[in-house]
Amino acid sequence: MKNLRLFPIFGAMITLIFGGCTDSEPVSINAIEGIYVGTITDKGALNKNDYLKTENEAFAEVTKIGSEKIQVHIYDDTMDVTTILDYYEHMDSIYVCLTGDDFENMYGHMLGQDHMSGGMMGDQQDNETQWTHHLYDEHQVGDEHFGGFNMQNQSFGCQFMILEDGIIHDLGFQGKK
C-alpha cells in the first residue's frame, strides 16, 4: 500500500455529496465515529484531458480527537490518506471544514479571524446551527465546502485531491457505517 502525499488543500476539493436535511433534532458527534465502508471513485488525473473513472472498495475511519475536531483516515488497497477536520452540527447532519493552515491556505485568513468576541461559538445567535454560524462568520459566498455525514442513513461522503508521482488525482469517497 502506498502512503500518498495529501495536498495541503485537502478540503478545497471536497464537495457536499448529500442534500441538506430538515429535521431539527440535534445529533451526537459520537454517532459519527467509526468505520465507513464504501468506494473511492478516481475521476482521473487533473492534468490530463482523458478522465478514466475507476472505483475501488475503501474504508474511512473517523475518530474524534478534540473539541470539534475529527481525524479522517481514508484507505484502500492502493492509498492511505489521513487528515484533521473541524465538524459542525446542522440539524440531523454534521458537516466538515478545513482546520489550521489548510483553512488559511484555502480561504486566505485564519480560522476564527472573522468571529465576533466570545470565542468560536460564543456569539452564536438564536436559531443558528453550528454550521450556519460557521458559514456566516468564516466564509464568503461561493466558498467551496467539503462534505460530511448524513445521520439519517449513517453515511459519510467527501471529495479530495492527492498528489502521486507529480500527478494530481481528483477522488471521492462515499460510504456507510
Image (cartoon, rainbow, N blue to C red):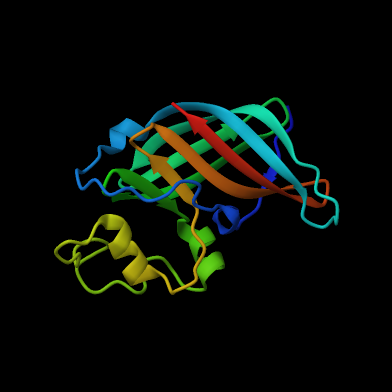
Nearer to the camera, 108 or 24: 24
In the displayed structure, 156 sits above or below 119; it is above
Residue 137 falls in which quadrant of the image? bottom left
- Residue 120 on image: x %, y %: 27, 62
- Work out whether 81 lies above or below 123: above
**Farthest residue in the left direction?**
126
Q: Residue furthest right?
A: 49
Q: Residue at x 70, y 35 (%)?
A: 3
Q: Position of residue 33 (x, y in %)?
A: 38, 31
User: Image check: 17 left or right of 26?
Assistant: right
Q: Is residue 67 left or right of residue 80?
A: left
Q: Position of residue 141 (x, y in %)?
A: 44, 74
Point 82% across, 57% down: residue: 47
Image mark count: 0
Q: Is residue 109 above or below residue 175?
A: below
Quadrant for the N terminus in the image: top right
Residue, x 81% and y 43% (percent of image)? 52
What's the residue at 25%, 40% (across, down)? 27
Provide residue 97's location: percent of width, then percent of height.
44, 55
